[in-house]
Amino acid sequence: MRCPFCGHEDSQVKDSRPTDDGAAIRRRRQCEGCAARFTTFERIQLRDLFVTKAEGRREAFDRDKLLRSVSIATRKRPIEPGRIEKLVSGIQRQLETQGDSEVSSKRIGEMVMEGLKGLDSVAYIRFASVYRDFSEAKDFEEFAGSVEDAGRG
């Protein structure tokens, strides 16, 4: 593993343990060149996934990008980081086991919306505002009203 500080090729694993959700292994490493310590995560990847964007462009699936999007929507909300991690891991697992090596960004967005809907209504509305490209206050009002109505039903 290349050191992020000095670029040295070799590092030694000092500690390994599973993450809280059990979907990865957290490793503490020490660079053999500069002695700096850093953390890496090892995850199972069942297949290479590609995301097809709305304009037709393809790019490799990036779990960290998905995690950042969900983290932005849930920022300053009373949600434990472990639940966010579990949501993202669940979405990734669903995508990898569905059988297709290509998935649309729209499908991923819908999966995130569905997950956030059960997690936190404010985070759900925040994500929807970007995902559905709200441009006016009435867009928020209408969507929030539909969320409120669904909560009553």
Image (cartoon, rainbow, N blue to C red):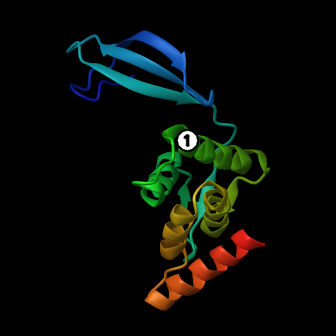
x and y, in percent, of residue 83 in the image:
58, 42
Query: Residue at coordinates 53% horizontally, 47% vertically from top-left?
Result: 63
**Residue 143 sits above or below residue 23 on the image:** below
> Who is closer to the viewer here, 112 or 136?
136
**Quarter of the figure with residue 54:** bottom right
Compared with 14, 118 (above or below) is below
Position of 8 relative to 73 (above/below)? above
Q: Where is residue 95 in the image (x, y as percent from the top left)?
A: 70, 51
Location of the C terminus by quadrant is: bottom right
- Secondary structure under badge 1? helix
Q: In the figure, is residue 76 to the left or right of 58? A: left
Picture quarter containing residue 45?
Answer: top right
Q: What residue type is labelled 1?
A: Glu
The residue sitting at 53% across, 72% down in the picture is 131
Residue at the image position 63 percent from the left and 27 percent from the top: 22
- Which quadrant: the N terminus? top left
Tell me if residue 7 comes above or below residue 86 in the rendering: above
> Picture coordinates of residue 94 (x, y %)?
73, 48
| Point 70% across, 52% down: residue | 101
Q: How crowded is mark 1: few (under 14 residues within 10 Å), some or many (20 or more)?
A: some
Say how many tags the image has: 1
Rendered location of residue 91, percent (x, y): 66, 50
Give the residue pinned by disc 1. 85
Please identify the residue farthest to the front as the structure is shown: 152
